[in-house]
Amino acid sequence: MHSKDNQLDKISEYVKQKFSNETTGHDYFHLERVVKNANKIAIEEDANLFITMAAAWLHDIADHKLTINPKKELNELLQFLKQLGLQHSQIEAIMTIIDTTSYSKGVIPTTIEGKIVQDADRLDALGAIGIARAFAYGGSKQRTIYEPTKSTGSTIHHFYEKLLLLQDSMHTNTGRMIAAERHQYIENFLNQFYKEWEGE
Ligand code: ADP
Ligand code: NI
């Protein structure tokens, strides 16, 4: 009746209609990428795939950047997951992950599935995609690209305030390996950026 694949399809459709108009880098395609990253890590780490996938799709649903009413969003989601036929324990696991994933909250998830979703979310802030998202987000907040005379405030500053710190915050070995590669890509980007800035 309620096959897990079918439930995951319904969950992805649920977030798709909610995130279709998002332009600050938290759009539906961010969710797709986090799901792909999380899937890869979950297989390596032998975690519960259904919980990991469901939570990856849903992790940004109550983000204050995306909704003015996170409580309402979470209540709606609860009803939706019940209707889908998820067990109480599954719903609880997913809701806890949603509550702990965000970087800005600074929480370390207690379950392996939660750690995986947090790693997968952070990987999407690294590499080429991470660079693109940073400038998209910075632009949406009226931030400049770079201001060499200031010590904070531009998007390049954000690289030092967050992106270059992510590699050391990974929980899983698989996540750490992917992060190392994407971290190096950002370092290379910054080197090239400063060269061009100086007219070299
Ligand atoms: P979370 O949603 O996990 O709390 P953020 O909202 O801080 O994480 O980050 C989401 C994305 O937006 C990331 O790609 C991040 O680099 C980018 N971002 C967040 N803050 C800034 C900023 N001040 N300047 C540029 N990009 C930012
Ligand atoms: Ni996210």
Image (cartoon, rainbow, N blue to C red):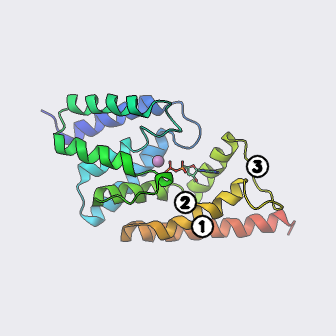
Q: Residue 63 vs residue 38: left or right? A: right
- The residue at which mark 1 appears reads as 185
Q: Kindly report the distance in space between the C-alpha atoms of the residues bearing marks 3 and 1.
A: 22 Å
Location of residue 177 in the rendering, given as x and y in whole percent from the top left corner? 44, 71
List x then y, in percent, for residue 51. 26, 49
Instruction: Residue at 36% x, 45% y: name it.
Output: 98
Q: Which residue is mark 3?
A: 144
Check contact, mark 2 vs mark 1: CB within 8 A.
yes
Q: Residue at x 80, y 59 (%)?
A: 150
Q: Amino acid at mark 1?
A: Tyr
Measure how far apart labels 2 and 3 are at the Cα level.
20 Å
Q: What amino acid is at disc 3?
A: Thr
Q: How far apart are the two marked residues, 2 and 1, measured between alpha carbons?
A: 8 Å
Q: The C terminus is located in which quarter?
A: bottom right
**Residue at x 47%, y 39% (from the top left corner):** 28
Frontmost residue, 46 versus 75: 75
Q: Quadrant of residue 79?
A: top left
Q: Quadrant of residue 77?
A: top left
Say if 177 sits above or below 147 in the image: below
Q: To which residue does mark 2 refer?
A: 126
SS state under label 3? loop
